[in-house]
Amino acid sequence: MADYKKIGFIGTGVMGGRMCRNLATKIGVPVIAFDMDMDKVAALDNVGVEAAPSVAAVVEASDIVLMCLPGEPQVRATCLQEGGLLENARKGQVFVDMTTATADVEREMAKLFAEKGVDFVDAPVAKGVSSAEDGTLSIMFGGSEEAFRRVKPVLDTMGTDVTYCGGVGSGQVVKLMNNMVLVMNVQALAEALAIGTRSGVDGEVLFNTLSRGSGDSFALRKHGMQYMMKGEYPDDVFPVTYSIKDMDYAMRLADETGVNAESARLVEKRLKEAEAEGYGKLYSPVLYKLLDK
């Protein structure tokens, strides 16, 4: 990692904290981090992550800065606020947004940072908390091919599938389609489980059999078999509110491209129903509870 003397990380929450831990243990370069909740950064002290007092301190110390934030508003604020990334950026740095946001905000930020000689790229992640924990995320990169070659060794510490998707913003497009398909799959599984069990088939038999046929999927094995089947809907994984946020971004893309994504809009409606029922903080397999009443 001759290109980087120190790497910064902003946003060490449920996903970011695990990603930062893998980065720090594998990269062989000092890592400095900041989060609004500095206790989350302190939890990484045992792998040598230095705590920064501010976003500005991370930028000042680092050659490359990664960020993993809740969504587009936080990306915009972290970049543009007083003391933020843009104000403190210097020529030659690279900023990697690993948030699930929108292609529009990534392209907007990329133009602003380019005026300072800084590469701003997007690299959102998929496959969830367990993959963030063990460093097997799927990472979807949007930016120049040159920036991709420069950043990929860093991303390889957090993911086993790092894909070049195209120019800035394309990583977000692919990620949003991933999450759209995933939550649609989760809704399909909830309906299948409800219909199957009410028709007299054991739920475990149903899902195990589907996993050996053409109905198999990542969602079936994880969301269905590990959570929905057991009636377990944790509040520390990926909440319904985050799924709603991602579906909203995906539906914006549908509108912009003139696609009538009717099936996806129905699932977005289901997610909002789940939030209205008080399930907003729970993992998305909780969609089954809407049918299990």
Image: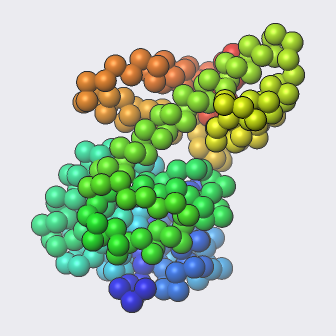
Whole-percent x, y for residue 235 in the image: 67, 42
Left-right relation of 56 to 217: left
Q: In what quadrant of the picture does the C terminus appear?
A: top right
- Number of marks in the rendered image: 0
Compared with residue 176, is residue 278 higher up or lower down, i.e. above or below?
A: above
Q: What residue occupies the far top of the structure in this picture?
A: 199
Whole-percent x, y for residue 228 in the image: 74, 32
User: Image point 51% across, 22% down: which residue?
Assistant: 267
Residue closer to the observer: 35 or 232? 232
Residue 145 is at least partly visible in this image:
yes
Residue 73 is at least partly visible in this image:
no
Among the 4 quarters of the image, the one containing residue 227: top right
Residue closer to the observer: 62 or 229? 229
Compared with residue 255, is residue 77 higher up or lower down, i.e. above or below?
A: below
Q: In what quadrant of the picture does the N terminus appear?
A: bottom left
Left-right relation of 97 to 256: right
Whole-percent x, y for residue 216 in the image: 68, 35
Among the 4 quarters of the image, the one containing residue 80: bottom left
Q: What residue occupies the far left of the structure in this picture?
A: 115
User: Image point 42% across, 71% down: which residue?
Assistant: 152
User: Image point 29% across, 46% down: which residue?
Assistant: 103
Whole-percent x, y for residue 231 in the image: 79, 31
Compared with residue 212, is residue 30 higher up or lower down, i.e. above or below?
A: below
User: Image point 62% across, 34% down: which residue?
Assistant: 284
Q: Coloring scheme of the render?
A: rainbow
